[in-house]
Image (tube, helix red, strand yellow):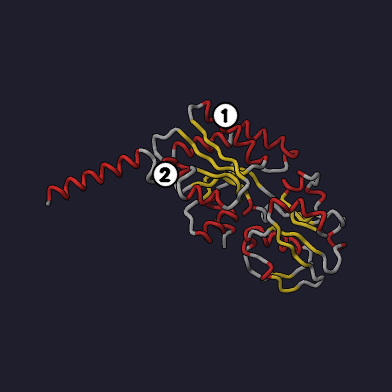
Amino acid sequence: MQRRKFIAGVVSLAAIVSLTACGLIGGAAGAADDKTIKLIVTESAPTQEPTKIAQKILEGQGWKVDVKYVTDIVQPNFAVANGEFDANYFQHAAYLEQFTTDKDLDVETAFYMYGSPAGVYSAKYKDINDLPDGAKIAIPVDPSNNGRALALLQTAGLLKLTEGKSLIHLSQADIIENPKNFSFVEVDQQSLSKTLPDVDAGFLFVRLGAEIGLKPSDALLFEKDEDALPFINLVAAKPGFAETEKGKALEAAYHSDEVKEWFKGYLDGALPTPWDRDPAADLKAWNI
């Protein structure tokens, strides 16, 4: 009987080792000697184009880079958390923090890519004070962006919100006073520019505004740099990935001179590249 148990144990151990070697247990994306980097990236210019540049650099260094381009902003964090991909590139810090907290996922910032300031724009009015009573305003539906437009309207004296609450946690539930009876239409962030003609005003990321010919100077209200801090777009991965050979190679390629030059030429350099900032220190500063 003891001999049978011993043999069974050896067979089971051998099976586990075999499955792990084949990548069926634990996800092959993280293997130490694996020269393949698997990325999941959204189909937008400031994520897709830098990825293509980084891919070319990495492949010239002997890496194999597999990239899946998607329009979905929900599944990429799950895909990294379960080991299907090494990293994703589509979101900003506030979205990552909110999403991983809500879904209990172990995914974190590996490194920053570009800033994403935003503002309130209008196709109908030239001044924020021209918005009429009952004006309809489009804002992002996702919680991490939902309060940004509300905070801007408060700076203009058009709303009063709950005091002492972090920007990333503000929502319509925090509206204490709304003297002009604005109504808010929550829209998927990728559709905000399309809805602008149908509302009195709308909240747009600078990239989305630029894609329909709007500059920051066209905004009725625009975020200050410190307000946009939680909204720096990033590459996310499992904890510890950034310190691996694979993680360091990926960061070096994304932070290359070639990628920096691409951002300088995109939308007249509207998207900053704060690569010298420390994401961990920034997280402590705004996630309160």
**Amino acid on which the number 2 mark rests in the picture:** Gly
Q: Is residue 23 left or right of residue 120?
A: left
Dots 1 and 2: beta carbons under 8 Å?
no
Q: Is residue 56 left or right of residue 33?
A: right
Circle number at residue 27? 2
Front of the two marks 1 and 2? 2
Say above or below: 286 vs 183: above
**Amino acid on which the number 1 mark rests in the picture:** Lys
Tell me the quarter of the image containing the C terminus. Answer: bottom right
| CA gap, disc 1 and disc 2 | 25 Å
Question: Which residue is disc 1 drawn over?
Answer: 56
Q: Which residue is pictured at 56% across the width and 40% down the height?
A: 68
Residue 93 location (% of width, % of height): 59, 52
Residue 254 location (% of width, % of height): 57, 36
Residue 16: name its quadrant: top left
Q: Is residue 64 left or right of residue 199?
A: left
Residue 29 location (% of width, % of height): 44, 41
